[in-house]
Image: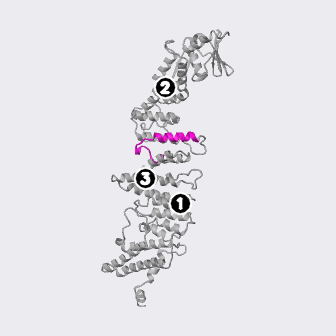
Amino acid sequence: MKFMKLGSKPDSFQSEEDCIRYVASDLATDVVVNVGDVKFYLHKFPLLSKSARLQKLIAATINEQQQPDDEISIPDIPGGPQAFEICAKFCYGMTVTLNAYNVVAARCAAEYLEMYESVETGNLVYKIEVFLNSSVLRSWKDSIIVLQTTRSFHPWSGDAKIDARCLESIASKAAVDPARVDWSYTYNRRKLNNGVPIDWWVDDLTELSIDLYKRVVSSIRRKGGVSPEVIGEALEVYAARRIQTDDHCHDVEEQRCLLETLISLLPGEKQSVSCGILIKLLKSSVSLECGEDVRKELSKRIGEKLGEANVDDLLIRASDGCETVYDVDIVETLIDEFITQSEKRDEVGCSDSSKAVVAKLIDGYLAEIARIEPNLSPLKFIATAEKVSSFPRSSHDGVYRAIDMFLKEHPGVTKSEKKSICRLMDCRKLSPEACAHAVQNERLPLRVVVQILFFEQVRATAKPSLPPSGSHGSSRTTTEEECDSVTATEETRTTRDKTNGSEKTKAKGVVMSRIFSKLWTGKDRDGVGDVSSSDTSESPGSATTIDDKSTPSTRRRRSSS
């Protein structure tokens, strides 16, 4: 830290109790200066030789008071008794040490006392200005300290342009090529190399109050030379240090103002701020009950890059008084924003890769929210899933996991609700592993299990004849008509291709298809609706047994009968 010593005489100021200060001298004091609740017993000559304001005040009291000592009051001097004492010691020629912590107070007090060059050459205002310009403002950390102290001295510090000069100094240094940084700085994060990191200045600015921080960041952006990505990182670090949303937050209004200010400082460039920090800000805005405009702006920014999020990011606690523990509505809003942005990108021919990523994300989110949210309704689960139902997926395993988790954690759903939930899944797009799990899953309706078995058999016997499942991941459940259509197609292919393989194997596939078709349509005729597999359990083993019993001779006997 830079410092400057003024004067050469020893400090002879002494105290009597807490409210009296005087100069130990053989000469009797002849003036009393009241500053706040402190009385200073001093001598006129050294004071009047350097302060135009004290000259005028003392002159005004000469004819008004009949006391041996003239008495004046300056209750509004910037910096109070401490700052006045620095100025008084300078007048006496006593040693005074100025540094970044007291220079603003001394400068404002000297301005108040009118200690200009016009009163005496080499006066206090001039000397402080030399110290500021030649030392303090050339130091990175001293500039930050001085800027912090200006908060207590408005409007004096503003009139003296101390604030503006500090902002200029800080912004200029932040824009310097890191290779030219040769001053000390604080860096609390891991360095990627041995050189000066491009964001070397970020940590030091977290010490600033939000109003000063806003002015500094705005100055840095106007100055140029700092990328939007570094600005975004600076805001992220500041938010992590300053925002409190837990029980330790004592001033919610202050925190809300801080958050809203940070959001207003976010760079407009898409890649300048990570999706993670945007979601953290959104979570804080929910916790602090910020205005709807704040949430809308954040949701829009998150929607642009929703594919960068992870499941934990989307687990946003709901506000007090909500029916659910987690805010599912806000996740739906994020999906809507993503869809809006995607539609704009589609107009210029963008690919569907981002949609596939978001589809996988939401599938994972639904599985997790179904597990941890006891009050998640079937309608809300379905509504959220349907928002990404048309997104491309390589498989529907994620959809199946989400459905299975919901049925497991919410056993009270009705049969009709279970049927609606299962419609979200396309049985044709389940992997063999998911199919193996599903056919033994007692939580699934029997009809869904039969569908899965049917398509597994069709896929195993005549994969090329499967109807297209849609390149964009249609999530509707396979209808009975589709099953019958596929069965008929399989029978035709089997008759046509007898000469290309084992007739016995082909016949077995046809029999299996007919059995599943009969099961399918039989349930309809018998009036069987959605029966859970806990009542009738089907498995690959049981299907094989039926197949083994149905031989060609058996079918002939049945036909003859």
Q: Which tag, 3 or 2, sits closer to the chain's start?
A: 2
- Residue 99 visible somewhere in the drawing: no
**Circle nearer the viewer, 1 or 3:** 3
Residue lying at the far bottom of the rendered structure: 561
The image position of residue 363, as x and y in percent, is 47, 59
Q: Residues within 10 Å of mark 2 (few under 14, many from 20)?
A: many
Distance from the alpha carbon under mark 1 to that under mark 3 = 22 Å
Question: Magenta span covers which residues?
Answer: 252-277
Q: Is residue 470 above or below residue 26?
A: below
* Kind of residue sitting beneath label 1: Ala
SS state under label 3: helix
Image quarter hosting the C terminus: bottom left
Q: Which tag, 1 or 2, sits closer to the chain's start?
A: 2
* Kind of residue sitting beneath label 3: Phe
The image position of residue 503, as x and y in percent, is 35, 81
Distance from the alpha carbon under mark 3 to that under mark 2 = 46 Å
Residue tagged by mark 2?
162
* Kind of residue sitting beneath label 2: Ile
- Residue 89 image-quadrant placement: top right
Disc number placed over residue 370 in the picture, else none: 1
Q: Is residue 381 above or below residue 518?
A: above
Residue lying at the far left of the rendered structure: 499
Q: Which tag, 1 or 3, sits closer to the chain's start?
A: 3
